[in-house]
Amino acid sequence: MPKKEKILNREDGLITFTGLLWQKNITMPFKNAVFCYSTGGEDATGAFMLQVIRPTKGYTFEDFMIGAQSCYEDISLITWYMDKNRPLPPGDAFDEYRFQDFERRKAEGFPKPLYQSNIPTPEATIEQQKEREEIGGW
């Protein structure tokens, strides 16, 4: 039985999730992954859980919740994190990586985000925000 893993590889833009039952894990570009949400039973039990569709003949689903309040928050956070052109999402889990991430994006000229969003994604400090606006134009 292969080790079952869920991996979000921001640097390379890859997502890994489990294969069905004994099948190997699936790794694919995040931009090609198709997400949906569960509809639940008649009483909506189990509804609105984020799922990724396996790219196999049977198109089976894998739960891909990461602990947010809803499937909408889960996919928003995942998409924000996977967009390597944006600052890391808020929260202390990423704090020790913010400076290195900022310097990497700065060296690349602050390219525009890979995925559209209506959620503002400011830098960690006002000074960094000004630098991004001057260099990257966004």
Image: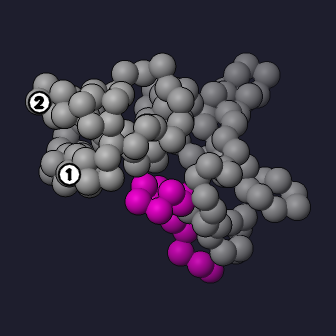
The answer to whether residue 78 of the structure is visible from this angle is no
The answer to whether 14 appears left or right of 89 in the picture is right
Task: Give the residue furthest to the right.
Answer: 57
Position above or below: 27 against 67? below
Instruction: Kindly identify which numbered label has been placed on residue 103.
Output: 1
Q: Is residue 14 magenta?
A: yes
Q: Is residue 42 magenta?
A: no
SS for dot 2: helix
| Residue 25 on image: x %, y % | 62, 70
Q: Residue at x 60, y 37 (%)?
A: 50
The answer to whether 129 appears left or right of 81 in the picture is left
| Residue 68 on image: x %, y % | 43, 32
SS for dot 1: helix
Q: Residue at x 33, y 43 (%)?
A: 110
Amino acid type, mark 1: Glu
Instruction: Kindly identify which numbered label has been placed on residue 129.
Output: none
Position above or below: 82 against 115? below
What range is drawn magenta here? 1-15
| Residue 32 on image: x %, y % | 68, 51
In the picture of the structure, the residue carrying the numbered disc 2 is: 127
Position above or below: 80 against 117? below
The answer to whether 5 appears left or right of 88 in the picture is right
How packed mark 1 is, by other alpha carbons closer than 10 Å (few <14, some 14-19, many 20 or more), is: few
